[in-house]
Image (cartoon, helix red, strand yellow):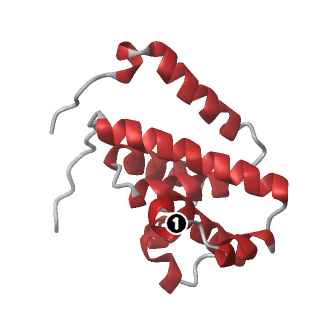
Amino acid sequence: MHPRLDMTKASPEAFKAALALETYVQNSGLERRFIHLIKLRASRINGCAYCVDMHVKEARHSGLSEQWINMMCVWRESPVYDARERVLLGWVDAVTNIAQTGVPDDVFNALKEHFSETEITIITVAIGAINVWNRLAVSFRSQHPIDKVAKAA
């Protein structure tokens, strides 16, 4: 697979607009673990290898456990996530898959039990931002760096 284009060169203005939204999310006051959760879960749903690679590394760097990172793809079956993380994961799933889910009331109502309206708005903007990045990276076939290849013992 080869990159289709470099968006930073093709349209620096479009890249700056996406970056401005990202800057807002990063400075929004939302807890770092929630930002990592949103970015990693949405990127996995969207099949964005570039973003999954980046956000796994960022989550590790922030001190989140390997188990917390790895179990996200099966979060419904794992007790590793607390109540706030679980409702947030449900919201990320519903919003990212909006065409299929319509974002059901029960998912929203569960979120309201744990987050304020301001937090819900910021969270939803953060989900929108990573979905923008995922769509750009997947569409343009952005390539993640290749780390040292592991060898089985």
The percent position of residue 97, horizontal first and vertical second, equals 47, 62
The percent position of residue 76, horizontal first and vertical second, equals 51, 81
Q: Quadrant of residue 5?
A: top left
Depth order, front residue of 78/76 = 76
Vertical side of 85 occupied by 51: above or below? above
Vertical side of 41 occupied by 108: above or below? below
The percent position of residue 105, horizontal first and vertical second, equals 68, 74
Count of residue discs: 1
Query: Residue at left 52%, top 66%?
Result: 93
Q: Quadrant of residue 143?
A: top left
Depth order, front residue of 106/15 = 106
Q: Is residue 36 visible?
A: yes
Query: Label 1 crowding class (10 Å Cα cut-off): few <14, some 14-19, many 20+?
Result: some
Query: Residue at left 20%, top 50%?
Result: 149
Relative to 29, 15 lies left or right: left
Query: Residue at left 50%, top 58%?
Result: 96
Depth order, front residue of 32/2 = 2
Viewport quadrant of the N terminus: top left
Q: Is residue 144 visible?
A: no
Helix, strand or loop for disc 1: helix
Residue receiving disc 1:
93
Vertical side of 95 occupied by 105: above or below? below
| Three-letter code, disc 1 | Asp
The percent position of residue 139, horizontal first and vertical second, equals 31, 38
Viewport quadrant of the C terminus: bottom left
Query: Residue at left 65%, top 46%?
Result: 125
Vertical side of 38 occupied by 51: above or below? above
